[in-house]
Image: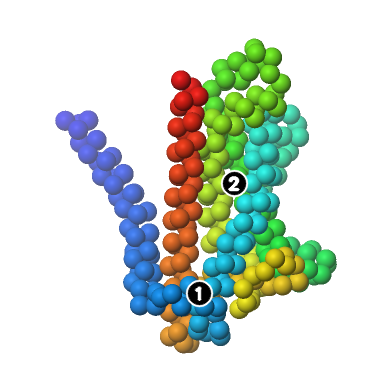
Amino acid sequence: MRRRILDIVMWSLFGVALALVVLPAIDIIVGILAQSAGSWSPELLFTPTSGVAGGLLNAWTGTLMLMALLLIMAAPIGVLGGIYLAEFGSQRLAQILRFGSETLAGVPSIIVGYVIYLVFVVKFGWSFSALAGGIALTIMVIPYIMRSTEAALRQVPTNLREGGTALGLPPSLTIRRVLLPMALPNIMTGLVVAEAIAMGETAPLIYTAGWSNSLPTAQLIHQPIGYLTYVVWTYINQPFSQAHQLAYSAAALLLVLLLLLIGLGRLISARASRFNDRFQV
């Protein structure tokens, strides 16, 4: 009887903890979708912002451009850093890199944005630009990618490494052909989390990317760029109903993009997992 009562109490506490996490998230999502439901139209997605009205074409295309730059810059650095920490983590340099990564993860995003502003926007004369914003976001998410890659590789069974060594494979080939395919699902999860974190940032982009009502171009410097979080952060404080509607629409579009990103990451991870199952068989 005592065990049954304890079991009921613990499951009740777990349920309450889950509700404390899930219910506020549901309330936020439902509230945003309800507030933005009346403004969804083709014009919203395919018209640039004009003053406190217009559409979100420049904002969502700019957000996608920033996320593409982030992936191009952060993924190679973060994954290679995680591989080094996982496979050569006992070396002194790896310990220094791990400490630096953990320290960087704790730096507030606005400080990262201000440093990039001083160095690239002011010192190098790039002005507000997509590349400066991409660098700020890259610096922010590299620790998360490194940590997830290191954890993913450490979960790969040791006998696979020993098997590669027994076959005479060099460490680089063992990592590339054996370890990385096995760790790919978890690495993809880390990349999705990093992209999601960056997609919701505003403070570092205000200092680096600025804002523009125009569509982004291939010019990466000397040209500001629009993004969805700026609309949410700025327009919700404007004393106009049109601005509020646009802010809620931008927040809803961010949720949609985030869900699409998570779905894409799950799809890639599932395919990688099926490949690993066939590999193990």
Q: Residue 145's image quarter?
A: top right
| Marks 2, 1: nearer the viewer | 1
Residue 267 location in percent, x, y?
45, 44
At a point 67% along the width and 69% down the height, the residue shown is: 217
In screen coordinates, is 259 left or right of 146? left
Q: Amino acid at mark 2?
A: Tyr
Quadrant containing the N terminus is: top left
Q: CA distance from mark 2 to mark 1?
A: 34 Å
Image: 209 above or below 97? below
Element at badge 2?
A: helix
Residue located farthest toward the bottom when viewing the structure as drawn: 240
User: Can residue 158 be spotted in the picture?
Assistant: yes
Residue 48 location in percent, x, y?
55, 78
Q: Nearer the viewer, residue 44 or 114?
A: 44
Earlier residue among tags 2 and 1: 1
Element at badge 1?
A: helix
How packed mark 2 is, by other alpha carbons closer than 10 Å (few <14, some 14-19, many 20 or more), is: many
In screen coordinates, is 43 left or right of 28? right
Residue 199 location in percent, x, y?
55, 60
At a point 55% along the width and 79% down the height, the residue shown is: 49
Q: Nearer the viewer, residue 108 or 169?
A: 169
Residue located farthest toward the left when viewing the structure as drawn: 1
Q: Amino acid at mark 1?
A: Phe
How packed mark 1 is, by other alpha carbons closer than 10 Å (few <14, some 14-19, many 20 or more), is: some
Q: Residue 20's image quarter?
A: bottom left
- Residue 66's disc is none
Residue assigned mark 2: 144
Residue assigned mark 1: 46
Residue located farthest toward the top when viewing the structure as drawn: 166
At a point 64% along the width and 46% down the height, the residue shown is: 75
In screen coordinates, is 199 left or right of 12? right
At a point 49% along the width and 29% down the height, the residue shown is: 276
